[in-house]
Image (cartoon, helix red, strand yellow):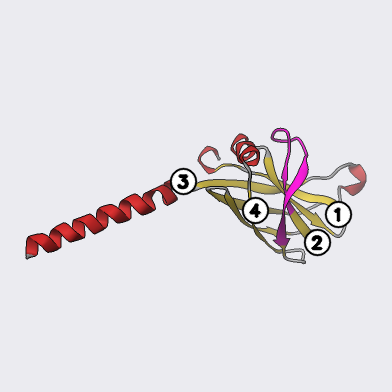
């Protein structure tokens, strides 16, 4: 009887390991620092603040969370964007939620296609935080593989 119970437990452990290992192994971590991005000298005083962003890719689902502080005006919105390469601005591929304040949080979930996943792994995706005084982008955080940071 005891041998049968041990065998059943061992089988249950093996099945659990096989079912859940791919989920945890497939998740990849990314992160970036929100840095002010003044477009020219005239916006330098309006584009201030900092923060961090982290992202977890599980399959095609990207979960993003982060925080920011020290903006000169309230945040208005946040976007996930894709450029041609790191440092090259691009178009929005997802909308995120941002606290409408000078200090707050960013969060959201975006489903990525294969091209967007490839861009993420190359470092070509970034989070843009807009503010009242910098509607074209107060801060940007390029998402890099967490292992390489």
Q: Is residue 88 shown in magenta? A: yes
Give the magenta range: 79-97
Of callouts 3 and 1, the N-terminal one = 3
Q: Secondary structure at mark 2?
A: strand
Cα gap from disc 4 to disc 1, whole angstroms: 22 Å
Q: Earlier in the sequence, mark 4 or mark 1?
A: 4
| Image quadrant in which the C terminus is located | top right
Q: Do the residues bearing badges 4 and 1 touch, measured as CB atoms within 8 Å?
A: no
**Which quadrant holds residue 78?**
bottom right
The N terminus, quarter of image: bottom left
Q: Marks 2/4: CA distance?
A: 19 Å
What residue is shown with label 1?
Answer: 135
**Which residue position is annotated with label 3?**
26
Q: CA distance from mark 3 to mark 4?
A: 17 Å
- Crowd rating for badge 4 (residues with CA inside 10 Å; few <14, some 14–19, many 20+): some
Distance between the alpha carbons at the discs numbered 3 and 2: 33 Å
State which mark lies toward you, 3 or 1.
Answer: 3
| Residue 76 badge | 2
**Could you say which quadrant of the image residue 99 lies in?**
bottom right
Label 3: which secondary element: helix
Mark 3 or mark 2, whichever is nearer to me: 3
- Report, in whole angstroms, how far the alpha carbon at label 3 lies from the one at label 1: 36 Å
Q: Earlier in the sequence, mark 3 or mark 2?
A: 3
Marks 2 and 1 close (CB-CB < 8 Å): yes
Q: Residue at x 73, y 45 (%)?
A: 81
Q: Is residue 110 magenta?
A: no
The numbered dot on residue 21 is none
Secondary structure beneath label 4: strand
Tell me, for residue 110, which label it has, or none: 4
- Near mark 1 (Cα within 10 A), the count class, few <14, some 14-19 or many ≥20, is few
Image check: 1 left or right of 43?
left
Rendering coords of residue 30 (x, y %): 57, 46
């Amino acid at each position: 009887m005891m041998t049968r119970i041990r065998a059943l437990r061992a089988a249950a452990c093996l099945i659990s390991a096989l079912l859940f290992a791919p989920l945890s192994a497939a998740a990849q971590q990314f992160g970036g620092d929100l840095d002010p991005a003044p477009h020219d000298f005239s916006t330098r005083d309006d584009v201030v603040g900092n923060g961090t962003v982290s992202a977890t890719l599980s399959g095609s689902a990207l979960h993003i969370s982060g925080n920011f502080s020290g903006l000169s005006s309230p945040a208005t919105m946040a976007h996930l964007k894709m450029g041609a390469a790191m440092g090259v601005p691009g178009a929005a591929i997802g909308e995120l939620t941002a606290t409408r304040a000078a200090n707050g949080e960013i969060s959201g979930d975006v489903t990525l296609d294969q091209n967007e996943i490839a861009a993420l792994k190359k470092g070509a995706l970034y989070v843009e935080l807009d503010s009242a005084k910098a509607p074209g982008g107060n801060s940007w955080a390029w998402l890099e593989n967490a292992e390489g940071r």
